[in-house]
Amino acid sequence: MKLARFFRRMGCLALTGAVCLGLGAPAAAVTYNDFDYITSHVNLRVPGSLRLTRPAGDTSTTSAYYFITGDSDPGSPLTMNGEEITTRGVLGSFGVYVPLEGGVNTFTFQNGDAAQTVTITRGSTAAATTISDVRSMAPSYDCATFSGEQISLSCTAPSGAQVVATVGGRQVPLKQAAATAYEGVPATFTGKTTAGQVSGTRNLGPVTYTMTYQGRTTSYQSAGDVYLTGKGDTLLVQVVNAATSLYQDEAWSAFIETPKQGGVDAVAEIGRNSYRLASGGWIAKESVQPLAQAVPYRLEVQGADFTVYETATGGDYGETLTLFGDAKPMFRAYMDGTGLHVKLCNTTLDQSILDTIRSQVAEQSRLFSTVTADYDSAGGGVTLHFALTGQQSLWGYDIAYGADGGVEIYAKYAPPVDLQSSQPLKNLVVVVDAGHGGTDPGAIGIPGADSAMEKDITLATAIAVQKRLASLGATAYLCRSDDSDLSMNDRMQMTRARDADLFISLHCNSVGYAQNANTAKGTEVYYYEEIAGPLASTLSAHLAGYTQRTNRGAKRSNYRVTLNTFAPSVLVEMGFLTNPAEYDSMASKQGIYQTANAIGDGVLAFFG
């Protein structure tokens, strides 16, 4: 496991579902003004002629306002009912927020020699949308309950249909939650049944929803399975996300920790959307997998080993304490100005092994001078405090599990950046993540789904950022280099495998078109770990300055990709796809060039 970490740092290993693409500086020197090189790959489709995209044709609504969007030839004036439209992007995208009178409202757009007219009828009711299948079937992910407790079942089906849910051999007729004005419109159907008695934990399988509607009977299955644990038996769950969120209460009012993939704990209480863990805190049901078979979750540490990792050139980049055992306990961890603090839940560590750890740390560690331990006799855990020497900066940390159990505590050194060098980021490893991709388009921009969407803009920008970072000497990797599906786990696991010094995830913001989307604008950058806060502030300010967008600033939040703890990790919202001016800027070569330079120079400023 430790050798694998070393070789991943040195070379490119294949990763399932992720693109591992390294880029060094090109043969010719790349300068700040190398526009052609930075943007040579950019070929985003944005129509340049008059076309309405919202609404695409005559429509009706009950709203008092409507946000009309479309494309136009940016070289010709654009008018609506004779009045010039000034809210246009450089590529011709536009949006106009119009008031609606009762009845028929007519809008005629003129763009050079092209013209298009649309009517929007404002009435007391809008046209009803009907469906003919079953959707939104619970559960959408594997979840568990205890014997004797109620299982809630629900789905969306056409109003007027008859729906029966079958789970664990029991048939449960569902009732339509509320009457609707029209038959066939989407309606919610719900029902409950009491879970039967079992021993241990059993997987009852998915829920089957059988619908009879308009003389036809069809069946559908939920995406998730139902697990049932006997009364008095222990329900175990295992974290399935590379990193997830642990909350203070069932209402998720406060975020308190970042459990990692593989961690196992017992469930003390089952809520509606989350479990209360025996070690404390509430975790979302969709973030964990109920276990039908018992596995160890209490770790008795059998031994320890301390290792310092070196690069191919002999420099050090991090160190790991491995605790051997056969369980994968949950943990709580954080770093501050005094050091790294790791609480291992459901863990016992005897004095002789602690003495061994102290001796190894004292002899080998570049970061820590000593290790102390606090024991939680009531909760059955131990907290290790690693005190900093002050000789090396603690850049980040990671907690991982061995294949058969045990814990690895990894501490990362700050990268050696030389701002006076012609290649100031030579020793820096950066993973650049193009948000969304494949079947996940992200937000849809002004021109609609047949033009550049969020996934397209983030990919074109990520490649440009990679080129700019490489010109500064950094080793820059892309999470994806094409329009491929990539899970959050893929993105985060690749970042860990690369031992990245920075992780930058690129996204585009959006708002609903029910409001005046012209007013939503600007850059913002999200982070969670305190060490990433200055990076987030710097990137948001540079992006705003280079692109002339509003700086909405750095914001702390527990988005999945910001939960990387081993390096400063940020989620960058470059601008709003629903704002015509910002959409066109983000889709243009000039806008992408500005963004690449903003991020490259922002990284330099972060280290300055």
Image (spheres, rainbow, N blue to C red):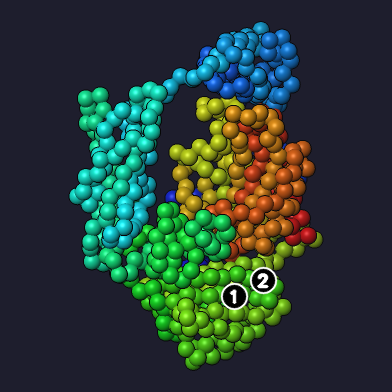
Q: Residue furthest right?
A: 420
- Picture quadrant of residue 573: top right
Percent x, y of residue 303? 45, 85
- Any part of residue 423 in sight: no
The kind of residue on which mark 1 rests is His
Q: Residue furthest front?
A: 179
Residue under the image location 69 percent in, 36 percent down: 521
User: Vertically, is 459 above or below 24?
Assistant: above
Q: Amino acid at mark 2?
A: Asp
Q: Which residue is mark 1?
A: 341
What kind of element bears circle 1? strand
- Residue 571's spot in the image, x, y percent? 61, 50
From the viewer's perspective, is 447 left or right of 353? right
Query: Relative to residue 209, is residue 262 depicted above or below?
Result: below
Residue located beneath label 2 in the image: 336
Quarter of the image with the N terminus in it? bottom left
Residue 358 position in % (x across, y down): 57, 87
Where, by quadrant of the figure, is residue 444 drawn? top right
The answer to which of 361 and 44 lies nearer the viewer is: 361
134 or 455, which is in the foreground? Answer: 134
**Who's the residue at 44% across and 50% down the image?**
17
Q: Mark 2 touching mark 1, by CB under 8 A?
A: yes
Q: Is residue 217 shown above or below 28?
A: above
Residue at 21% over, 48% down: 170
Q: In this view, which residue lies farthest toward the left?
A: 169
Q: Is residue 254 left or right of residue 394?
A: left
Question: Is residue 395 shown above or below 51?
Answer: below
> Is the residue marked by circle 2 packed among few (<14), some (14-19), or many (20+) residues within 10 Å?
few
User: Disc 2 to disc 1, how far (Cα)?
Assistant: 8 Å
